[in-house]
Image (cartoon, rainbow, N blue to C red):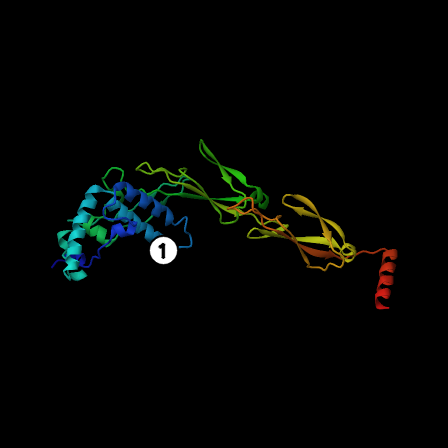
């Protein structure tokens, strides 16, 4: 037996319908819809922490290259019928005669390329041994109209905004050449928030328009610490106000407020201002809280009269 046939007998059957999550009777429209959804879901740019996303995307593209091409799909369906018939008769995986289905000649390993809306191309690897054996690894060189491997690529960009912009919502203008696009970032956005702009990504060979995603980064603020929708603020308070009680001005993202500090307040004590935090991104009418942490200011330079008064106060406390 030739080395080619030995290699062919070790091929594992790939269930492309299962990969795309469609039935074997699915229409071309349903197959294309399922493919586009999965291509978005597993795109590595949108799943940077998922190391398996790239491999899943390759499998999805391979499945679509076959099922999206009427001639390849017909051959695959005939193969599938023979394969399942072999299985139902108790045949072992290694006993199936793949040589009846193998493409003559040396397989050519293709690749599929993406055009990036902002000029950064991405390229991925080739297809499985199963595909190469049955279809000759035509890949992106597929001759079926509109069924090439130029996959819809959703473009991902990062924008940086201030905490104030995150609290009110803002607009960023993106430009490339003569094209410009105003993108609205909603109130309550936080670092990691993604804003989807449908149909503003690159156009593929089959006419599909990808989406544009903006990943938001909120710049750290020198006054406020953010935890989800709540804000924390350290507020310097004169020691006399802490002892005697009084009014202080609290700066918030929505303007200054007057805060009543109770007599005998301690350093580090926290006062909650309800509804003065960040808006919730899913419900902009709902706000987090602002927690004001009192930071006592101890006088460092005293006049002779002030020092005398402090000494008198100290004597009174000890008596």
The residue under the point 68% across, 59% down is 269
Q: Residue 181's spot in the image, x, y percent?
A: 47, 35
The residue under the point 18% across, 58% down is 7
Q: Residue 21's spot in the image, x, y percent?
A: 29, 50
The reply to whether residue 149 is visible in this rendering is no
Q: Residue 3's spot in the image, x, y percent?
A: 15, 58
The residue under the point 84% across, 60% down is 310
Q: Is residue 40 left or right of residue 65?
A: right
- Furthest-left residue in this view: 1
Label total for image: 1
Q: Is residue 305 left or right of residue 215?
A: right
Q: Compare residues 124 and 76 and report the one nearer the observer.
A: 76
Q: Which residue is mark 1?
A: 52
The reply to whether residue 256 is visible in this rendering is yes
Q: Vertical placement of 20 versus 211: above or below?
A: below
Q: What is the secondary structure assignment of the residue under circle 1?
A: loop
Q: Compare residues 319 and 114 and report the one nearer the observer.
A: 319
Q: Quadrant of the C terminus?
A: bottom right
- Furthest-top residue in this view: 178
Q: Alpha-carbon neighbours of circle 1 within 10 Å: few (<14), some, or many (≥20)?
A: few
């Amino acid at each position: 037996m030739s080395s080619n046939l030995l290699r062919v007998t070790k091929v594992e059957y790939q269930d492309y319908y299962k990969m795309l999550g469609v039935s074997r009777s699915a229409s071309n429209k349903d197959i294309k819809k399922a493919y586009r959804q999965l291509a978005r879901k597993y795109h590595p740019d949108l799943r940077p922490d998922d190391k398996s996303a790239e491999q899943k995307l390759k499998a999805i593209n391979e499945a679509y290259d076959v099922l999206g091409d009427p001639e390849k799909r017909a051959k695959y369906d005939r193969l599938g019928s023979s394969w399942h018939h072999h299985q139902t008769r108790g045949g072992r995986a290694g006993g199936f005669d793949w040589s009846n289905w193998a493409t003559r000649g040396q397989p050519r390993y293709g690749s599929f390329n993406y055009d990036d809306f902002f000029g950064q191309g991405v390229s991925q690897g080739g297809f499985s041994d199963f595909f190469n054996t049955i279809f000759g690894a035509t890949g992106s060189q597929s001759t079926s109209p509109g069924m090439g491997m130029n996959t819809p690529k959703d473009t991902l960009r990062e924008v940086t905004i201030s905490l104030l912009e995150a609290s009110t919502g803002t607009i960023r203008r993106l430009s490339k050449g003569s094209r410009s696009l105003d993108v609205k970032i909603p109130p309550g956005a936080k670092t990691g928030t993604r804003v989807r702009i449908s149909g503003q990504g690159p156009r593929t060979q089959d006419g599909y328009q990808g989406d544009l995603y903006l990943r938001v980064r909120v710049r750290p603020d020198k006054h406020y610490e953010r935890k989800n929708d709540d804000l924390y603020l350290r507020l310097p308070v004169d020691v006399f106000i802490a002892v005697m009680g009084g009014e202080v001005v609290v700066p918030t993202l929505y303007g200054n407020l007057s805060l009543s500090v109770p007599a005998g307040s301690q350093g580090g004590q926290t006062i909650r201002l309800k509804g003065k935090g960040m808006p919730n991104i899913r419900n902009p009418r709902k706000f987090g809280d602002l927690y004001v942490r009192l930071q006592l200011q101890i006088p460092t330079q005293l006049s002779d009269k002030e020092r005398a008064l402090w000494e008198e106060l100290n004597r009174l406390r000890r008596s």
